[in-house]
Amino acid sequence: MFVFSALPALIAGHLLQSPADPAVEVRHLVLDSRRVGLPAGALFFALRGPSHNGHRYLPELYDQGVRLFVVEETAELPGSLSAYPGAGIIAVKSPLAALQALAAAHRAEFSGPVLAITGSNGKTIVKEWLAQLLSPDEDICRSPRSYNSQVGVPLSAWELNPERHTLGIFEAGISEVGEMARLAAIIQPTEGIFTNLGTAHDAGFASSQHKLAEKLQLFQGPQFRRLFYCYDQPLVRAAVAQRNIPGLSWTRHAGQPADLYFALDPNSTSGITSLHARYARVRLEAAFTLPFSDEPSIENALHCLAVLLHRQVEPAEIQRRLARLHPVAMRLEMKLGRHDSYLLDDTYNNDLAGLALALNALSRQSRPGRRTLILSDVLESGLSGEELYARVAALLPPAGVTRLVGIGPEINRYRHFFTLAPPAGHPPLTADFYPDTEAFLASLDPNAFAREVILVKGARRFGFERIVAALQAQQHGTVLEVNLDALSHNLQHYRRRLQPGTKLMVMVKAFAYGAGSYEVASLLEFQRADYLAVAYADEGVALREAGISLPIMVMNPAPDSFSTLQHYRLEPEIFSFDMLNEYLAAFPAEAQPSAAQPLSHSVAPPPIHLKLDTGMRRLGFDEADLPALAALLQQHPARLPVASLMTHLAAADEAEHDDFTRTQLAAFRRMAAVLEAALGHAVLKHALNSAGILRFPEAHFDMVRLGIGLYGVDASGRDAAALRPVSQLRTTISQIKTLPGGHTVGYGRRGAATEAERRIATLAIGYADGYDRRFGNGAGTVLIHGQRAPLVGSVCMDMCMVDVTHIPQARAGDVALVFGEGLPLPELAARIGTIAYELLTNVSERVKRVFVSE
Ligand SMILES: *Cc1c(COP(=O)(O)O)cnc(C)c1O
């Protein structure tokens, strides 16, 4: 525990203001005003990112009761210090460095072993599996999920409790040079695992060797004893030797000078792997069976096995634990529930850190309606029941939970914590309790869950997947899976390209390019985008009704929708004099303010966005229109409030037209200057779409308009590797038929006969789902068991057929990937002469969207 007054020395800061209680102890670290939990003892670090400034949230945090702050020396605080009476405030050069220094000091108070995991793949799984395998022997503190970043590692290390934990397991991930040394200083590992060196894109590094050298910096320092690594990775082996890192290596090849030899039985039956282990140093030979047979799982398990053998756990005991290894649910799945509900399915584990993360995900949902939490006993906390459930209860109001279903003996025993009056400003909580999952299911009325967001969070042994199954909407075989983490990743990728202060408008037209407008908009609101844009008024109305409050531009509003726009605070794009005149007619002069009758909010016309045509020749005012336009704007300043001036480029993604693009940008500058002079003040200006953002950094103006890039498709042709695919369209095999030679397939017998016998799979997707007819007859392909299967015959309304002769393991019910990882959209689009935009936006609304995040 650290007393606040001791911090300045620890984190190289100076005290700006002393707290009311000079002996106050720091208990929790807070980085996000939306995730405070208990304010007593909470210390907020005001971090700064490309588009984020933590200092802005000080007043809000103060109102929530937070009294301890670390701020940046040079930052201007909102309000003067007197706005924060009784608060302790420390100024430092870098709040991130201060957070890391505090975590490092905390880690140094722990004298037990700490194992650090890095590498390209498998970090989280190895960490989770090791925790499962060692939990009978140790009280383990581990990073929650994949908290392995510059911010995640200090938060994880802060959870180490010297009085109760006997082992720490933390993962470390880096994307840039210099980052690993900082993580190593926090973790101070005594042991380590290097999982593997992958070939994944790593823009921040010159080469694989460079990346490896950087990563191995984790395993240094006088306290470091042992690195577990695979001898069969030559680069890793050489680098470990060169740096004299003390190691324990394992190999799968006979005759290698590694410490451990694992001989895998090539004849293992499917689904399991038998192996023989030889650990010469302690003369141990033993046989093991792993409950899986895929390569990545085997590699991950062998790392764990090396650690267990080194710790001299009895082989028979190791085998018992291995048999119970269960897959790691890496992500929280968002599913459609019955009666317009949403389910956040997190039924893998339930410790305090995991619960806090899941509640964060819940609080991010801006969809209106009740927030329900179905919660089992919380395990592995090491706290007394009193303290644990007091903390759990304190987490619920800030996450907006208004209904709790508590399941399990422990939560029942401490139910009184959940019936206390909520803190000021929070609605009361209703709570029901059940002794076990069976009792809940027996009395479950699915109609009691409607139009709400339900977080289902339970430890494995409570079997909450049965609750999810009972509350989930029925799904037809085709699903569009949207990865919200990939979306956030892509958003950050573009943000990093912007100057500080440049605003970001995100295009969520056409159902957010097919991905689901509400969910995408909700995430963007959480990520603090500045503006959203849709094509039609209805789309904007739907977002407002779903609770989205960001400013929204409507690109093509019908004149008869102007009053709707006003009602829903939507801002029209205006591109012609006809529209301007209709706008003036919709908001007549009588409604204008006077000294006696100021304009009330409800009758003020919404701000407008003027579209200037600089070469697209589609919509917008021409240069010749400017005098008349300027005159109108001057004549009606209150009835035509201009929010922005915009233009759209015809060929932002095509280098051969760059000269033309530059003339468009020059025309835009010229035209905007004329209008700003007429208005007498500057307004927001914006011109660039996704490709333009990357290709014309000099023309970002005040705002950019991000579209397809957010959804993971690189339109600029230079950045594909840095983006993550967001959407994955999957369907299932309905039936497989074996066709003798000479038989045709489908309508018009267009699936031509072949001489040889074929296996044909019928898939549950057709053109009514948005699967293009042009994919028929061999033009398209899907992935089944990782192999490509070409289309046979025509695409029908609800189904299509593929040839799986070369995929003998294909069965009815198996998944077929239509697009996603391994089947990139640009390639598929090229096969039928279209563009990725069309494939994305064609996925019909009857296809269920499933949202996942890690
Ligand atoms: C759709 C759209 C964009 C975004 O284009 P992308 O190529 O998807 O980035 C930008 N501006 C306007 C006016 C648009 O209609």
Image: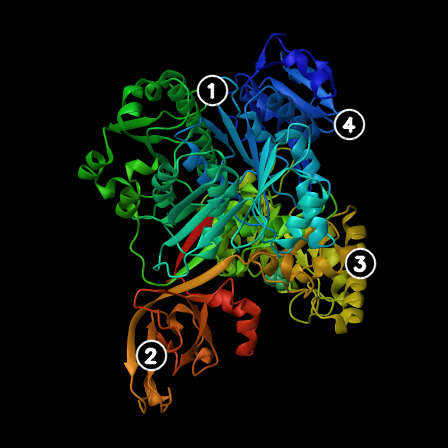
Residue labelled with disc 4: 74
Q: Quadrant of the N terminus?
A: top right
Q: Secondary structure at mark 4?
A: loop
Left or right placement of residue 823 versus residue 428 in this view: right
Q: Which mark is residue 669?
A: 3
Which quarter of the figure has residue 178? top right
In front of the other: 533 or 516: 516
Which quarter of the figure has residue 530? top right
Of the two numbered discs 2 and 4 in the rendering, the one whose residue sits closer to the viewer: 2
- CA gap between label 2 and label 4 equals 69 Å
- Please report whichever mark, 2 or 4, sits nearer to the chain's N-terminal start: 4
Instruction: Name the amino acid, label 3.
Output: Arg
In the rendered image, residue 405, in percent from the top left (x then y), is placed at: 30, 31
In the rendered image, residue 318, in percent from the top left (x then y), is placed at: 39, 39
Instruction: Name the amino acid, label 2.
Output: Arg
Q: Which mark is residue 759?
A: 2
Residue 734 appears in the figure: yes
